[in-house]
Image (tube, helix red, strand yellow):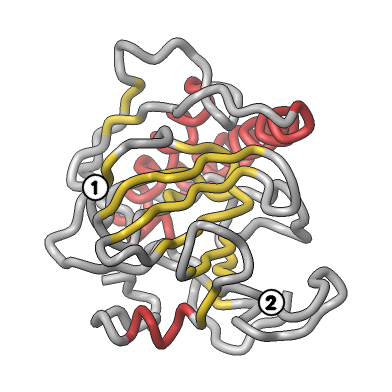
Amino acid sequence: MRSYRRHPLLVPVLICACVVLAVRPDDDGGGAGGGSDVSARVARLYAESAVAARQDDRGRQETVRRELDAARDQLQSRADASVAAGACRGAVRLDQAGGRSAAAWVAPVESYDLSAGFGSGGERWARHHTGQDFAVPIGTPVRAVGAGRVVRVSCRGAFGIEVVVRHQGGVCTQYAHLAAVTVDRGDRVAAGEWIGQSGTTGNSTGPHLHFEVRGTPEYGSAVDPLPWLEARGVRLDGSGR
């Protein structure tokens, strides 16, 4: 993936250390990523990494990093199996504290490298790239950029595991190549609410989030996400609002 603007990958540091994560009691262990246990473990380890980084506990940071790497591999493996089967098994329901934003619009991830941009060429696209890629590690929390309703959760094809949200006025946003989803079709979501965990499913060369802004839920109606977000007060400068 070609990078034209870079930001440090500081996801574990930027995740609030007070985030409390747990599998909801009604979760049956399913999920598009293939296991609520590993999704919850990845989320918990992100939070632990943030605490260790804030305390400058390098020994603990290294231990958590190794555990997180192993958990990410397991999460991606289960996601790949789900895509190969072409079937989603329902949302992985993770409780989150402070997951919603006071702002009306936010970036889809908190920290990232911007890689392939809208309209760029490449061997992996039939014509031009239809979204903006955010290079992030597997398991990074993916957020709804604004309030809306989930109109699609799919686990097949070039986009791998994907979520599409329709916002007020009919505009839709797509979040693709995920490793797990935390919502089901029909769910209402708020700005900043977690809707999935990033991955590298489908037609993907490495871990990243493919983000699109569309006029309809369907492929082929995309517009450039960067000016669209900036017009709503979201500048992709690494802060993620």
On the rendered structure, is 27 left or right of 159? left
- Circle 1: is it few (<14), some (14-19), or many (20+) Cα within 10 Å? some
Residue annotated with mark 1: 99
Q: Nearer the viewer, residue 80 or 186?
A: 186
* Circle number at residue 241: none
Would you say the residues marked 1 and 2 are in contact, meaning their CB atoms lie under 8 Å apart? no
Q: Amino acid at mark 1?
A: Gly
Residue appearing at x 18%, y 47% in the figure:
98
Mark positioned earlier in the residue sequence (1 or 2):
1
Q: Nearer the viewer, residue 237 or 10?
A: 237
On the rendered structure, is 34 left or right of 99? right
On the rendered structure, is 39 left or right of 14? right
Residue annotated with mark 2: 129
- Give coordinates of residue 196: x percent, y percent: 45, 43
Residue appearing at x 49%, y 14% in the figure:
29
Residue appearing at x 30%, y 56% in the figure:
54
Secondary structure, mark 1, is loop
- Give coordinates of residue 182: x percent, y percent: 41, 35
Q: Amino acid at mark 2?
A: His
Can you tell which quarter of the image residue 81 is in? top right
